[in-house]
Amino acid sequence: MLALLAVLQIVSSIPTLGSLAKEVGGNRVNVESLGKGYQDPHFIEPKPNLMLVLNRADLLLYVGLELEIGWLPPLVLGSRNPRIQPGELGNLDCSRAIPVLDVPTTKVDRSMGDIHPQGNPHYWLPPGNAKIIAREIAQRLEELDPEGRGDYEKNLAAFNARVDAKARQWESATRKLRGARIATYHKSWSYVSQWLGLEEIGYVEPKPGIPPDPQHLARLIALMKEKQSKLLLMEDFYNRSVAALVAQKAGAKLLVLPTDVGATPEIKDWFTLADAVVRTLSSSAPGSG
Amino acid sequence: MKLALLFLAVALPAAAQQSDGGVPDDLQKELEKALQADKAAAAQGGQPAPPAAVAQSTGSAPQTLLRGAQSLNPDFSVILDADVGYQRRAPQLLSGDDPDLKAEAARHALGFTAQEVELAFSAIVDPYFKGEVYLTIPNLEGIEVEEAFATTTSLPWNLQIKAGSFRSAFGRQNGQHLHMQDFTRRPLINAAFLGADGMRGPGVQVSWLTPLPFFLTIAGEAFSLRGDPADLSQATPQTVPSFGGDGSSHPTLAAEAKAFFPVSETWSLTSGLNFASGRSTGLLLADGTPVGAGRDSQLYGADVYLKWKPVNVAQGYESLAFQAEAIFRHLSGGDGIQDEWDGGAYAQIVAQFARRWFLGIRGDLVGIPSSTVLPRTQRIGGSLTFQGSEFSRVRLYAEAEHADNSSALLPQVNPQWAPAVFLQLEYSIGAHGAHPY
């Protein structure tokens, strides 16, 4: 019972953040996620039972950059939990130290689609960013639970060492893909493209969150053919029929990739998630059949 | 009483921090002493020492500087609902934010209206409150405060207090603003029992999230509602309000229990039980004679919301929601009218059958039983909604209302059948906050 009381209860908006918290927190923390790995993190329904989960939390982790703006704020307010309200120690926006991509440089409005005025929030896959998130979580855990400082620092160092070792493997496995021209469904692969040196030439969605029309798709198919783009990337929670048709017409391969821990039962933590993405990508590289 | 509760709201977080911080007693006493000394110094006009620079909790400063312009202005948005439509005659039970084409009792209307312009402001006030203000201009007729309230964010014991002027949590649709409705007009029970503008006004709400394994909140509310009696000399149908009589001396009280059951990942069930008690304003007969003023009035309600929606769109864009709500009212005898009961209900189904398309059907029935102040009225309505984005929609809505001439006090309605059809355009601009489930 005493051991149970000492455990910090962490609730994350998406499972990957919870997984990183578990790496750093070890057995001093218990993690639970509001969203599932097979859900679109933009559109999780703010069901009231999630307020109960938040009610018990000592620390709330979220992606930030307005990814969860459509559902998380009413849950946090409704949780009646003073510890996790904005501005409190138990409220951690994991984007705070991330070098954010796709930050609009001109005035934005919604004619541009469902844009994120603060930049692209899909940042958690590349190893460099995972290390930043883990460090942020470790620092916050040390503030919330100073007695665990030694454990958190030890776990963070071990995590970083594992990430560095895996990152070398992943980079060599995807070397052949460097410079490859790709199309994606939603503009959510910028960080992966930057990590692996992919060049994004177009998107199935004409604007973020806006469904495609035939003219746009015809232009995209022509562009993919012209630029010899052989890969079309999309998340596993979107409807596949349109993307499959575009890939077929453009002579490209459709890669449906997981983006979150729990996307499939085998993806149990951040390492297996990044592994799954890299494996799928590298198996589609030219010359790998 | 409101002031006392507000004081409680401010004082309680401090108490909670003391009790659950795990600070040793002697240290806590020492800290309290130091804080009091600071306060005393401030009271004597002494300047408090500047706070020491707080170390950044991150090891490195955030690398992005272009995080959008930081601003402490509240989030601000505007919502417009504009309509073109036809009504055979004035509807029997018109809500304030229903489209009003100014049809008369026996005369049709055809034309345009701006059903509602809503201005919404919201922000976190400080570590203790969230503030929200909603101004509404229904049918271009003057600006009203639809809601203006504070919600506490840091009370202990799972309590939350709402204070200011706000919509009651009675039932499912009363608390919702127009743009959350699935149909162009509100359900008939809204105007029949809760008032043309819904049950809203200055008051306080205390709600408690119970420590049960499933979601259950219990709320108590008190409002000062002031209303005028229904004036039967008017050319349009009038509804006799349940509350608002003796408003200055007699608060309207309400209590609600709301439960949520996540039946499965795709199915969920929300249900509520509601009670409210106050005094009716009564009515003025066509010759100006007041009848039924100050009758005690109690509402008993229940609501249910059952929803099916796949967890992600790879499984399809379809969804299905069933919603139903019933209210029964007891009006005590007095001022020449006997003790009586009346009631009403509606049920609706809304189906999303494609990514941007929704089809809804709703049946309304009030006056079961009917009373001297509420004749039976039936309505069937359907809506087809195209949602261009999360910020705009176009809705075609058609209804047919049938009024029974079953009240001895109220004027006879002719024609009894009244079809109506509306094309509604709705948009939202600005940073509009997320809606509750």
Image: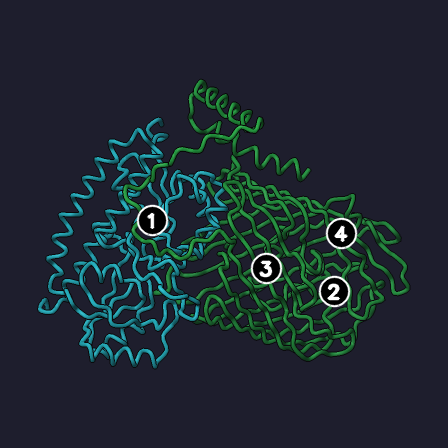
Q: Amino acid at mark 2?
A: Arg
Residue B293 lies left or right of residue A160; in this view the side is: right
Q: Earlier in the sequence, mark 4 or mark 3?
A: 3
User: Which residue lies at the image location 36% right of the left edge and 57% below the top edge?
Assistant: A41
The chain letter corresponding to green is B
The chain letter corresponding to cyan is A
Distance between the alpha carbons at the discs numbered 4 and 3: 21 Å
Residue extending farthest front: B46
Q: Amino acid at mark 3?
A: His
> Which residue in the structure is indicated by mark 3?
B177
Above or below — where is A264 with respect to B412?
above
Q: Quadrant of residue B89?
A: bottom right
Q: Amino acid at mark 4?
A: Arg
Residue B390 makes an appearance in the image: yes
Q: Depth check: B53 or B267 in front?
A: B53
Above or below — where is B418 with respect to B22?
below
Above or below — where is A32 with respect to B284?
above
| Labels 3 and 2 in the same subunit | yes
Q: Earlier in the sequence, mark 3 or mark 2?
A: 3
Per the rendering, the mark at residue B376 is: 2
In x, y percent, where is residue B238? 78, 64
Residue A30 makes an appearance in the image: no
Q: Earlier in the sequence, mark 2 or mark 4?
A: 4
Per the rendering, the mark at residue A96 is: 1
Distance between the alpha carbons at the discs numbered 1 and 4: 49 Å
Distance between the alpha carbons at the discs numbered 1 and 2: 59 Å
| Labels 4 and 3 in the same subunit | yes
Q: Chain of mark 4?
A: B
Q: Amino acid at mark 1?
A: Arg
In x, y percent, where is residue A16? 29, 50
Q: Secondary structure at mark 1?
A: loop
